[in-house]
Amino acid sequence: MIDQNNEPILIGANEVCQLLNIKRSRAYAVIRQLNAQLTAQGKITIPGRINKKYLIDNFS
């Protein structure tokens, strides 16, 4: 999915690595943790992907 600025809404581990300056294995752990939080809120998640806005909101 692409937002109005032609940026992806859902990002994978490679993008998380770049945004947070972490290794790929840690990026997958972050994605799993955030997806667990979203699932607990009743949201539908995709393994290995995270909403970019949700990631930024949780790490700023």
Image (cartoon, grey):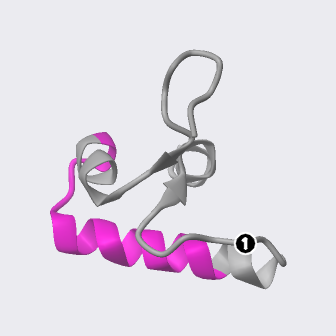
Which secondary structure type mostly characterizes the magenta part of the structure? helix
Q: Position of residue 52 (x, y in %)?
A: 53, 45
User: Furthest residue to the top?
Assistant: 5
Q: Nearer the viewer, residue 35 or 10?
A: 10
Instruction: Give the position of the N terminus as an image quadrant.
Output: top right
Q: Position of residue 59 (x, y in %)?
A: 50, 51
Whether residue 11 is in magenta: the answer is no
Left or right: 23, with 35 as reference point: left
Amino acid type at circle 1 is Ile
Left or right: 44, with 12 as reference point: right
- Residue lying at 82% horizontally and 76% vertically, measured from the top left: 41
- Residue lying at 22% horizontally and 48% vertically, measured from the top left: 21
Q: Measured along the vertical axis of the image, is residue 41 above or below residue 4?
A: below
| Start-end of magenta stretch | 19-36
Residue indicated by mark 1: 44
Q: Position of residue 34 (x, y in %)?
A: 56, 71
Q: Measured along the vertical axis of the image, is residue 32 above or below residue 2?
A: below
Q: Measured along the vertical axis of the image, is residue 58 above or below residue 36?
A: above
User: Furthest residue to the front?
Assistant: 1
Q: Nearer the viewer, residue 2 or 28?
A: 2
- Residue lying at 25% horizontally and 72% vertically, measured from the top left: 26
Element type at mark 1: loop
User: Furthest residue to the left?
Assistant: 23
Q: Measured along the vertical axis of the image, is residue 35 above or below residue 23?
A: below
- Residue lying at 72% horizontally and 72% vertically, measured from the top left: 44
Residue 2, by quadrant, is top right
Q: Total label count?
A: 1
Q: Position of residue 6 (x, y in %)?
A: 51, 19
Left or right: 11, with 34 as reference point: left
| Mark 1 residue crowding within 10 angstroms, few (<14) / some (14–19) / many (20+) | few
Whether residue 26 is in magenta: the answer is yes
Residue 12, by quadrant, is bottom left
